Image (spheres, helix red, strand yellow):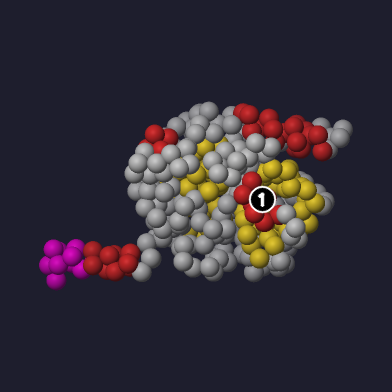
Amino acid sequence: MSKMLQVAFIVSIINALAGQGCICVEIIGGQDVKPGSGTYMASIQNAKKHICGGTLIHVQWVLTSANCAVDFFLGKHVTVVLGTHSLKKKTGVQEFKVIEAITHPNYNKKTEQNNLALFKLDQPAKLNKNVKVLTLPKSTKYINYGTKCKTLGWGQTTDDDDDLPDTLQEISLIVIKQETCNSDKYYKHDPVITDNMICAGDKKGRAKTCKGDLGGPLICKTTLFLKKQFTGIAAFEKGCDIMNKPGIYTRLSNHYLKWIKKKIKGKLGNFTFEQNF
């Protein structure tokens, strides 16, 4: 077969798969996380079913999105599972009841502003090789467009498949310009992507979080010393397979960092906050 025919054949296969909704996150960057990585990841569950992601930022606190708190917490029995790489794994995992959900007071579901929440566990987690705290950043002002990032989660790998992957997934992303994300080709200011948000995907605006990934961490390689740091929270997405609709993340701005620390410190009485971050 000539090279021209080979190219035509490959293109026809890609087009056929696209028609079946198969051009998805897995193909454009998703992969299994290596065992022993993502030890800070929390699986937020209802009736033993994974519904959202989260990040262990303190032995008794998980940071997640406000969507997870508003949509799933009220009136339901919610638990947090730590130390799991596989959702089917039962040995060695730690499971906790969520005894309090604190949503940012200015969260607006319509605009997606201030989309973050804290879940308090009924008892402190036991830190070990499988369960670790992810340190909050001192600042995220060095996150520029083009910055390489990753996000983790157990969410769907296609928009039309309700089955969640058993193994924790990792997706490689890059930060997209705010102006680009607000353009008519992308979100068209619906909602408006603000300075408190990070727009991240692949170069075509596809690779992103999907259902079940909300609340998970965005970890970026900052321009300051090229250090990887906890940068944002998966806030929302519009269609896992839709072009030019990258995932949107709540940026861990100084304002949000102060709010997080104030809430946790206020609930811990005489506890010395700095010793745990």
**Residue at figure coordinates x 52%, y 62% from the top left:** 156
The stretch drawn in magenta includes residue 2? yes
Q: Amino acid at mark 1?
A: Val
Position of 38 compared to 5: left or right?
right
Q: Main secondary structure of the magenta part?
A: helix
Asked whether residue 115 is drawn in magenta, I would say no
The quadrant in which the C terminus is found is top right
* Residue 181 visible to the viewer: no
**Residue 250 location (% of width, % of height):** 56, 40
- Whether residue 188 appears in this view of the structure is yes
State the residue at coordinates (46%, 63%). 158
Q: Nearer the viewer, residue 82 or 248?
A: 248
Residue 67 drawn above or below residue 211: above
| Quarter of the rendering occupied by the N terminus | bottom left
**Residue 164 drawn above or below residue 210:** below
Residue bounds of the magenta highlight: 1-10
Residue drawn at x 40%, y 41% as measured from the top left: 188
Q: Which residue is mark 1?
A: 70
Q: Classify mark 1: helix, strand or loop.
A: helix
With 105 as the anchor, is 199 left or right in this view? left
User: Residue 64 at x, y = what percent?
Assistant: 64, 47
Q: Is residue 46 left or right of residue 181?
A: right
- Snapshot quadrant of residue 103: top right
55 lies above or below 43: above
Q: Is residue 160 above or below residue 197?
A: below
Query: Where is residue 164 drawn, in percent x and y?
Result: 55, 66
Tell me which residue sits at (14%, 64%) in the image: 3
Residue 174 as seen in the image, left or right of residue 111: left
Q: How many other residues sit within 10 Å of disc 1, few (<14), some (14-19) or many (≥20)?
A: some
